[in-house]
């Protein structure tokens, strides 16, 4: 003897399946996002280090220029040191074994 589900029971089962699929999709999306963030962490840290070293040492060079009235010398030295240190840190993180 075959049993047929009522229309209401069928729609209720369909809604439960759809909700379960949506929750599963959201969970998978969040897991994927967390994985991307974990993988991009070292690259982001290296980029921030590069930016910070250029800005801080360039700013220090500018302040030294203002104090000693030796315009662009301190700024150029600060920017040069910032680039060297920043790219060194970037290379360290990129070529890490």
Image (cartoon, grey):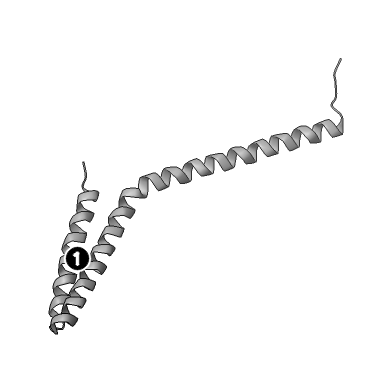
Left or right, 22 with reference to 94: right
Q: Position of residue 50 (x, y in %)?
A: 25, 61
Q: Which residue is mark 1?
A: 82
Determine crowd level at label 1: few under 14, some 14-19, many 20+ residues with C-alpha closer than 10 A.
Answer: many
Q: Is residue 13 above or below residue 67?
A: above
- Dividing the image into 4 quarters, which one contains the N terminus? top right
Q: Is residue 95 left or right of residue 5?
A: left
> Percent from the top left, x then y, of residue 59?
23, 73
Residue at 31% from the left image edge and 59% from the top image edge: 48
| Side of 82 where 27 appears, left or right | right
Q: In the image, what residue occupies the spot 19% across and 82% down?
A: 66
Out of 83 and 10, give the one closest to the viewer: 83
Quadrant in the picture for the C terminus:
top left
Q: Report the front residue among 51 and 18.
A: 51
Q: In the image as oriented, which residue stretches furthest toward the top?
A: 1
52 above or below 41?
below
In the displayed orientation, state which residue is furthest to the front. 67
Q: Quadrant of residue 83?
A: bottom left
Q: Residue at x 66, y 36 (%)?
A: 20
Q: Secondary structure beneath disc 1?
A: helix
């Amino acid at each position: 003897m075959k049993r047929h589900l009522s229309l209401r029971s069928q729609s209720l089962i369909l809604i439960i399946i759809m909700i379960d699929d949506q929750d599963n999709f959201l969970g998978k999306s969040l897991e994927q996002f967390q994985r991307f963030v974990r993988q991009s962490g070292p690259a982001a840290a290296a980029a921030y280090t590069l930016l910070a070293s250029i800005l801080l040492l360039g700013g220090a060079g500018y302040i030294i220029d203002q104090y000693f009235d030796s315009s662009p010398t301190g700024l150029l030295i600060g920017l040069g040191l910032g680039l060297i240190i920043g790219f060194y840190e970037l290379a360290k993180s990129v070529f890490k074994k």
